[in-house]
C-alpha cells in the first residue's frame, strides 16, 4: 500500500487498517506472538474459516502481518505481526482500557437505577 491510497484523516487511516472487529481481534491475539491458523480460529470466537482466511490475507496485503509457510505434510502456516502490526499495540491497549471502564460505568448506572 502506498501513501496515495490512504485517507487524509489519520483516524480514517487507522480505521482502514483495522476496519472491522475481526482484524482488531486477530491483532490482539498476534500481539502475544506468532500463531497458527487453528490457534487463531479457536481464539477469535465466532469467526468462520472463510472470514479468517480473508482477513488474514487483507492484513498481509496491508503489511500488518507476515505469513510463513513450512513445506511439510500436512502444511504448516504461521502468522506474525510485522513492526507496523506491533505498532498498533497502544491502539488495542486503549480499546481494552476503554472497554473495561465502560463496563464499570454501565454496572454503576445499573446499580443506581435499581
Image (spheres, rainbow, N blue to C red):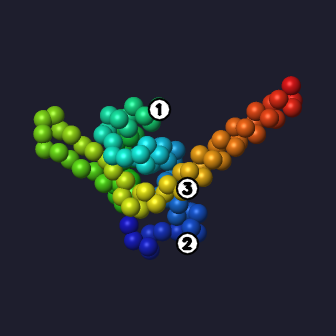
Point 55% across, 55% down: residue:
91
Mark 3: few, some, or many residues within 10 Å (few <14, many ≥20)? few
**Earlier-in-chain disc, 3 versus 2:** 2
Could you say which disc has been placed on residue 45 in the image?
1
Question: Which residue is denoted by mark 2 in the rendering?
Answer: 8
Could you say which disc has been placed on residue 91 in the image?
3
Residues tagged 3 and 1 counted as in contact (Cβ below 8 A): no
Point 35% across, 35% down: residue:
39
Q: Secondary structure at mark 3?
A: helix
Q: Position of residue 44 (x, y in %)?
A: 45, 36
**Earlier-in-chain disc, 1 versus 2:** 2
Between the C-alphas of marks 1 and 2, the distance is: 33 Å
Which of 21 and 91 lies nearest the eye of the viewer? 91
Q: Is residue 27 left or right of residue 66?
A: right
Q: Secondary structure at mark 2?
A: loop
Point 12% across, 39% down: residue:
72
Between the C-alphas of marks 3 and 2, the distance is: 19 Å
Which of 38 and 33 lies nearest the eye of the viewer? 33
In the figure, residue 63 lies in which quadrant?
Answer: bottom left
**Earlier-in-chain disc, 3 versus 1:** 1
Q: Position of residue 86 (x, y in %)?
A: 43, 57
Amino acid at each position: 500500500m502506498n501513501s496515495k491510497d490512504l485517507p487524509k484523516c489519520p483516524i480514517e487511516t487507522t480505521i482502514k487498517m483495522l476496519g472491522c472487529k475481526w482484524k482488531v481481534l486477530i491483532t490482539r491475539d498476534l500481539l502475544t506472538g506468532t500463531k497458527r491458523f487453528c490457534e487463531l480460529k479457536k481464539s477469535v470466537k465466532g469467526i468462520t474459516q472463510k472470514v479468517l482466511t480473508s482477513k488474514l490475507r487483507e492484513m498481509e496485503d496491508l503489511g500488518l502481518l507476515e505469513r510463513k509457510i513450512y513445506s511439510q505434510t500436512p502444511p504448516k502456516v504461521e502468522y506474525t505481526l510485522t513492526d507496523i502490526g506491533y505498532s498498533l499495540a497502544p491502539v488495542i491497549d486503549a480499546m481494552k482500557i476503554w472497554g473495561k471502564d465502560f463496563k464499570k460505568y454501565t454496572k454503576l448506572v445499573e446499580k443506581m437505577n435499581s
